Amino acid sequence: MEATAPSVSDPAADARHDAATAMKQALLWINGVMWLFRVGAIAYGVQTIVAIVALQDLRVPLGAGVIVVGLSAALTVIMLIGALRVHFEPFRWTIASACIATAVALVHLVGPNPLDLAFLWTGLWAAVLWATIVPMRHSQRLMAQHQDLYILHHASRQTRHALQGRTPQARHERLVAAMRKAGLKAWKVTAVTGGSILVAIVIAMVSFVAGVRPDEFAPSRVAFERAWNNSSLIGIEQVLAEEAREHRAAWLGGMAEGHGWGDRFPALGDGTIRDDKLRNLWIDYDLGDDVLLSVHWRLRDREWWITNLELPEPMFEPVLERFVAAWNDSSPEQIATFYSAENRARIIASIQRSVSNLNWRRYPTVLTTETEEHPRRRIVTLNLDEGEAITRWFFRDDGRWGLTDLDFPRQ
């Protein structure tokens, strides 16, 4: 039986095989990251557009919003450049993208909605990029150790044909020249494309903020709160919408009288924003004593105006007490003040006729009152020492309880 000759190991061949295997694995990582950059360029491009559109919402702080747009735009360009340059400098472009993605995630984290979809997406993307840092660093080291083998993998068919028959030194020089030429071409493409994208983003952001984003709300709110705390109806009128100015100012004066504030409004507490919509919002203020002031703001022509004010109906009992005092004083003029101003002269004459028909020198004293409550209405029976009188009241649009009917006792 003939013995089998032992195989002779070729160290050089083994080294080339190991290098080719390692380079193949490195190329898989580099190609994978290249696709990450391509997907990232598209994704961050979309996020940049969304961030620019979001600047029209005043709930998005302008400073933080511009930072997010800038970082997203930078990531878009970095991803675009990385997709073209990752084959030349994989580690540098990967770590640069990971740092910017992390910065964007941190900006979202300190924003008004820290755990929203934008933060989760940016944070996940940053984590993926950081996970590729070690393999990409290893790949760049392999590129430096086996430069010719790596360049040959990316060489064109023309370059491969030109390498035939050349000495190792000539092959190396030709490969390095081909790689340098490819790198220069990639820089030109990325400079033109990236610069165009950045210019377009800046123009879009400036145009969008200047033409679409509403004016800041804070100055209008401060003007109203200052006018209220100074008890200035004139100041409040200046921030009221034109169609509500005259009516709501008169209403507020009546409310102040009905709530017993006199010439001094209660100080505003910290306002709470509710029903916050893009161009409409309500702010509630606690005035104490279970009194809540609700202010409706609306954006019109890039300015914020108050279109409505809401306060609870003032207590009816103080109004009734003043009426009873006027009755017991036998004063038709004082009683007429509880009617609307345009009817007072007629009411005084009517009261005087009724009193004359009843032959009263003085009105019978009010002993007790009975109040029947209805929404925005009250029916009060005055129990007199001579019969009874019936009054009907209505909560008027001027913020006051007004007398609508006064039925004297029958003869």
Image (spheres, rainbow, N blue to C red):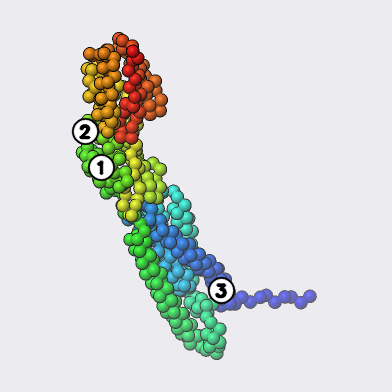
Give me the C-alpha separation between circle 1 and circle 2.
Answer: 14 Å
Query: Element under label 1?
Result: helix
Label number found at residue 236:
1
Q: Residues within 10 Å of mark 3 (few under 14, many from 20)?
A: some
Query: Element under label 2?
Result: loop
Q: Give the amino acid at mark 3.
A: Ala
* Count of all numbered marks drawn on residues in the image: 3
Q: Where residue 201 sits in the image (x, y, percent)?
A: 39, 66
What residue is rendered at 35% in x and 14% in y?
Answer: 410
The outermost residue toward the right is 1
Q: Which residue is mark 3?
A: 20
Give me the C-alpha separation between circle 3 and circle 2.
Answer: 87 Å
What residue is rendered at 26% in x and 17% in y?
Answer: 356
Foreground residue, 383 or 71?
383
Foreground residue, 107 or 240?
240
Q: Which residue is mark 2?
A: 264
